[in-house]
Image: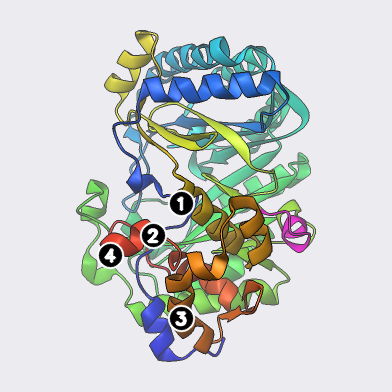
Amino acid sequence: MNIPQTLLQRLDVPGPRYTSYPTADRFVEAFGPTEYAQALHQRAEGAMVGGAPGLSLYLHIPFCEQLCYYCACNKIITKHHERGREYLDVLAQEVELHTRVLGRGKPVSQLHFGGGSPTFLSDEELDWLMAVLRREFRVVDDAEISIEVDPRTATPQRLARLAAMGFNRISFGVQDFDPDVQQAVHRLQPFESVRDLMRAARELGYQSINADLIYGLPRQTPESFARTIEQVCQLRPDRIALYAYAHLPGRFKPQRRIAADDLPKPEQRIQMLGGAIEGFIAQGYAYIGMDHFALPDDALAVAKRQGRLHRNFQGYSTQPDCDLIALGVSGIGRMGATYSQNAKTLPEYYDAIRRGEFAVVRGLALTRDDLVRRAVIMAIMCQGRVEFESIELAHLIKMREYFAHELAALQPLVDGGLVEVGADAIQLTPTGWFFVRGVAMTFDKHLQADKVRERFSRII
């Protein structure tokens, strides 16, 4: 990539990942359990006249046995596995709260377990939870059923049990294979153990195997990270998610254990990103968008080629826009033109559900302007192209009038060879795809209004 240094510096800023627009930091406490229940009822009424979109489920399992210093997830560090049983009982109550409104047996096309570490739960507990979900919902035959796995808490035998439960997609948290980096972030997991798990997953017939990586971690160097990239390519996962580490010790207490002097410099981060992109593409991976790569025959790569890529709170998806029910502490969901988030602490979450109330503590009802901008931003993030006519017909606006300021603000990116603005469309260039967040940020009205971005990871 031959990008001017001045443009790289302009793009080396914090910015959202746009798993939603508006982003979760815009949620307000005025949207609570009553508003969420209303959105559910509206979906139930829409379903009766055949108008409800598809349905996805996300389950947040917050427990981990060990603390990873870089982690910004909502998690609870404990070795007391008996805590999982109480959590599952409350999760089941939350599921039933939803099906009382929606009705039982509604079809679900996506099911994702995240955390924390879902594999903190025993096989018997996971099996029980899957039985609850299948009792209350109808998980369709070709549903995508995925789980995040901590390689330190998994064995090939466990992967076989998960497959028997119906899980057909799996994601391994790798982050980095360098022992020095692993020690600095308190996450020791040998290359060989991850290799053996991926081999087992492939033999068991998992439809997609993902590896998560992070660049910008303490003690990483462009050279050491290049070795990790080579090792990951040897494993040949179907998908790779490459995240930029966001060092925000003021917000995330575990990160205070990371010495700032150990963090790579900005120019080294850029080298790592560039090296990773070149390494993956050289090994035949397709760039999906915003730090995601996939083998050409993976469903994500096929969806991108066919213009069917979508985006939700879990990242890129092959599924059309779905309503997303988020279950568990801190879960973030989408219902119609609303977003919602559950309570972030176990006591608050438990209290609400046991009272027979939804545990939603904040959320957002989208305005007309939010919906217009969401359509533009998601078109950029997923297709790399915004067709003016489709936005104008769907939202009854004139693009060049409505977004006059934003189109003018795109000019430096046009001059830098990242974007082309024509008479009827905005188009990312092949290089522009690698900086898609920077392009999308131009249309983020909330972000432009306050300029406070330190809560986000850096684009590069």
Mark 4, mark 1: which one is toward the viewer? 1
Cα–Cα span, label 2 and label 3: 31 Å
Query: In percent of the image, x 40 and y 75: which residue is there?
Result: 269
Residue 453, quarter of picture: bottom left
* Region in magenta: 301-309
Label 3 packing within 10 angstroms: few (<14), some (14-19), many (20+): some
Cα–Cα span, label 3 and label 1: 38 Å
Quadrant location, the N terminus: bottom right
Cα–Cα span, label 4 and label 1: 19 Å
Residue type, mark 2 in image: Lys
Q: Give yes or no for contact between labels 2 and 1 (Cβ–Cβ under 8 Å).
A: yes
Label 2 packing within 10 angstroms: few (<14), some (14-19), many (20+): some
226 over 245 or under it: above or below: below
Q: Give the secondary structure at mark 1.
A: helix
Give the image location of residue 62, x and y in percent: 40, 32
Q: Give the secondary structure at mark 2.
A: helix
Q: Which mark is residue 369?
A: 1
Q: Is residue 97 magenta?
A: no
